[in-house]
Amino acid sequence: MNRLTLLVTLILLISVANGFGCTTAIISGRATPDGHPLLYKHRDSDHFQNAIRYFTDGTFNYLGLVNADDTEGKEVWAGVNSAGFAIMNAASYNLKARDDSTELADQEGVLMKLALQKCRTLKDFETLLDTLPKPLGVESNFGVIDAYGGAAYYETDNWGYHKLDVNDPAVAPFGYLIHTNYSFHGRAEDGYGYIRYQTAEQLFQQAVSMHQLNARFILQKVSRSLQHSLTGVNLATDPPDEQQNPQFVCFRDFIPRYSSVSVVLVRGVKAGENPDRTLMWTILGFPLTSVSFPLWPAAGNQVPTMLSASESHFAPLCNAALQLKERCFPIKRGSGKNYLNRTALLNRQGNGILQQVLLLEDRIFQETRREEAILFQKKNRQDEIQRFYQRLSGTIRQFYREKLNLKW
C-alpha cells in the first residue's frame, strides 16, 4: 500500500469512527407502559439540514425524514406510512463480507422509501428484500414495526438478511433491541458505536426497571443524554455557574454528537388498533438545541411549515437549531467540533439552551396528550390536527425568539 492510499484509508476510517452513524432501537409493546411499540432513530449524518415530507407516490401515503436538499424525494431516512408500517436504519460496518467488491452502495434511503411505498407488514418487507434484484447495495440494520404487532430488525447486506424478532423473548428478553453501527451477525472485531450502544443499554435498563420506557423518556433522556458509558462522565451533573463564561469539554462518543442531525420516534399501534393512531415524533436539527414535534400520518399532506424544506433547502426549525448549535461549538478551526461549550446548554441559573428546550418540550408533551384524547373522536380530525400544528408552531417560534434570542 503506497502512502497516498494509506492516507485516504486512514481518513475514511476516522470519518466513519467519528462521524455518520446512528443510534437506534425497537421496543416491543410488551416493554412499554401503554402497550404500544416504538421505533427510534437518532440520526448522525453529514447532511445537517433535514426536513419532513409527506409523499403520495406509492400504494400507501407516508411521512418521511429527508435531506432538505433532496428536492426529488429520492431517499427517506426514517418514516411511517398510512398502513402503520414504519422503518428506519443504522448503517452497519461489520456485516458485508470482506471479499464483497460490489460497486453499488448507499442504497439504504432508496430501499426505505420503496418499503414505505409498498409495505403493510413485516412479511411484505421480507418479500421486498427477497425479490429485489441483488446486489441490494446496502449494509445496514433496518428496523421495522407494523400495525399488527410486528417488530424486528433486519441485518441486511447485498445478498440477504438476518431477522431479529423483538417480540421473541429468546431474542429480546427485556422487550427491546438496540443497534448502533454494527450487526450482531457481523464480525465481532469490526463495526462502530459500541460505546453509544452501551450508554443506550444502561439508559433503557433504567427505564425498564421503572416501567418508564416510553416515547418521552427516549426523546428526552436518551437522545439528550450527556452520559458516557466508557468514562463514566455525565456532563449534566454539577452544571457551571455562569452562562457567559465558556467551559469546554471533550465531546466524543456520546449518543448526541456534533454529527447528530435529527431524531425520529414512531409510536405504533397495538394489534387491531386503527393505524390512524400512529404518531411520529421528530426532532429536526441538532437534538440538544431543537425541540420535539408530533406528527400523525392521518393529518394528510400538509406538513407544518417549520418542518418543511424551503426553496433555500432548509426547514425553519432545523435551521434555528443549527444556529443555536453554533453557540455550543464556537471553535471552528482545528478539532473545534470535538469540544462542546457546556455552559451554552446548562448552567446553575437554569437558562441554558437545553434546559429551556426541555421545559418547552414538557409543555408540548402535555398538550399533545390532551389533544390526542379528543382528536380521534372527531370526524374532521385532519382540520383539527392542522389547527393544532399551527398553534404548536406559533408557540415554538415565539419561544425561540423570546427565550433563546434567536431571529426567526
Image: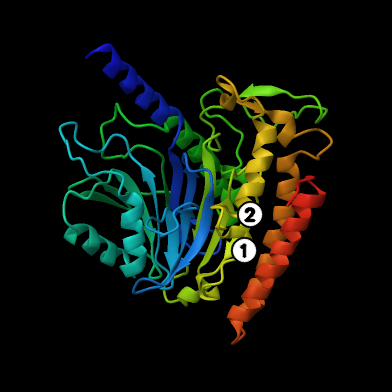
Q: Position of residue 235 (x, y in %)?
A: 66, 29
Q: Residue furthest front?
A: 311
63 vs 372, left or right, is left
How many numbered dots are placed on residues in this image?
A: 2
Q: Helix or strand or loop: what does disc 1 sit on?
A: helix
- Report if residue 211 is visible in the image: no
Q: Specify which label sits upstream in the sequence, 1 or 2.
A: 1
Residue at the (41%, 40%) spot, across then down = 180
In the rendered structure, the answer to whether residue 376 lies left or right of residue 181 reads right
Task: Residue at 75%, 61% (x, y): give it.
Answer: 395
- Residue 350 lies in quadrant: top right
Cα distance between the residues tagged 1 and 2: 8 Å
Viewer-closest of 126 and 271? 126
Label pair 1/2, CB-CB below 8 angstroms = yes
Quadrant in the rendering for residue 6: top left
Label drawn at residue 169: none
In this orientation, does residue 207 appear?
yes
The amino acid marked with disc number 1 is Thr
Q: Quadrant of the N terminus?
A: top left
How crowded is the residue under tag 1: few (<14 C-alpha within 10 Å), some, or many (20+)? some
Give percent across and percent down for residue 153: 34, 52
Q: Secondary structure at mark 2?
A: helix
The front one of 344 and 336 is 336
**How far across and how far down the image is residue 266, in percent?**
50, 60
Residue for point 59% across, 50% down = 219
What residue would you read off at disc 2?
316
**Residue at position x 58%, y 79% from top?**
382
Mark number displayed over residue 305: 1
